[in-house]
Image: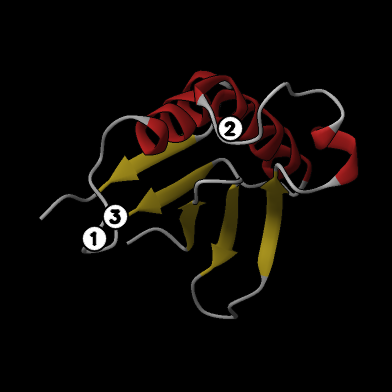
Amino acid sequence: MEPFTLDVFISKRFVSASITHRVTSKQVAVAGTNSKDIKAELKSRSDIPACLAIGRILSQRAREADVYTASYTPRERDKFEGKIRAVVQSLIDNGIDVKIYLD
């Protein structure tokens, strides 16, 4: 198992993602469309371009914290498609190695 986990939360109004250390439960990188700096750049805070932006910003913040790998396991109610897939793919495209564990 990787020491860092990826958590993605998508609602009808916003998108949020974080990378957390598995042992200490400390969040090392966080990005969300509710923050002031990101909110100003986006037309919508919950569409696919917003998800891609969150993935890009989260990958920059993770690299600043020297995190280059993470694991992602979707919650029971989440399907690995659409907006969640866009966030994870954006992280991968921007240099974070994400191992995906599907049941």
The answer to whether 48 appears left or right of 85 in the picture is: right
| Mark pair 1, 3: CA separation | 8 Å
- Secondary structure beneath label 1: loop
**Disc 1 residue type?**
Arg
Q: Mark 1 points at which residue?
A: 77
The residue sitting at 35% across, 32% down in the picture is 85
Q: Are marks 3 and 2 in contact (CB under 8 Å)?
A: no
**Could you tell me which residue is drawn at 33 percent across and 29 percent down?**
82
Report helix, strand or loop for mark 3: loop
Q: Where is residue 47 in the image (x, y as percent from the top left)?
A: 53, 27
Quarter occupied by residue 73: bottom left
Q: Position of residue 64 (x, y in %)?
A: 78, 41
Question: Which numbered tag is attached to residue 55?
Answer: 2
**Could you tell me which secondary element the residue under label 2 belongs to?**
helix
User: Badge 3 is on which residue?
Assistant: 74
Up the image or down, 4 lies above or below 93; here it is: below
Placement of the C terminus among the 4 image quadrants: bottom left
Mark nearer the N terminus (3 vs 2): 2
* Residue at x-position 21% and y-position 64%: 76
Quadrant where the image shows the N terminus:
bottom left
Disc sitting over residue 63 in the figure:
none
Pick whichever of labels 2 and 1 is earlier in the sequence. 2
Figure quadrant of residue 63? top right
